[in-house]
Amino acid sequence: MKLDTMINKGKRLDLEDLPTQLEAKIVSEETKTDRFGREALYITLQTKDNKQLTQKYTDFHQPDLALALLSYGYADTSDANGKMLTWKLTKYRMGNPRLIPIPKK
């Protein structure tokens, strides 16, 4: 593989670089135990310009994620894989903000 091709693959985004809303699709998801021993859902999002960001959703964040995805008629997070959605950076009283899809009206 050419090195100049590799440079642009998998560019990562940081929370500080994000606008308050962005369009992105789920490219992968995984449930695993975090370093505090909590089970969490890790979702990797990819923007239209192929930049990626992985978000961790604990029990604290999952209800908001679930309600937003249910508004699209999805029954499982995997139903949203590959679908471009508008995500909003949502602040919580504890921890870092999380990207939550804007619910469909």
Image (spheres, grey):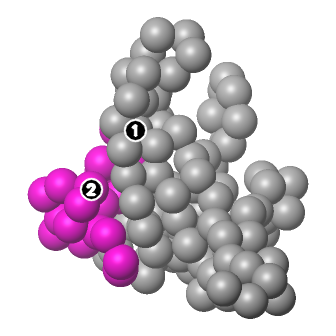
* Residue drawn at point x = 68 percent, y = 77 percent: 9
The Cα–Cα distance between marks 2 and 1, rounded to whole angstroms, is 10 Å
x 73%, y 63%: residue: 12
Among all residues in the image, which is located at the extreme front? 1
Q: Which residue appears at 63% of the width and 34% of the height?
A: 92
Q: Decide: is 49 above or below 51.
A: below
Q: Is residue 100 visible?
A: yes
Q: Is residue 10 left or right of residue 23?
A: right
Q: Is residue 64 visible?
A: no
- The residue range painted magenta reads 62-83
Q: Quarter of the image containing the C terminus?
A: bottom left
Of 81 and 101, the residue lying toward us: 81
Q: Residue at x 85, y 63 (%)?
A: 17
The question of residue 82 being in magenta is answered with yes
Residue in the foreground of this view, choosing between 3 and 38: 3
**Quick one: quadrant of the N terminus?**
bottom right
- The mark found on residue 69 in the picture is none
Q: Which residue is mark 1?
A: 41
* Left or right of 26 on screen, residue 18: right
At which x and y percent is residue 76? 18, 55
> Which residue ends up furthest to the right in the rendered image?
16
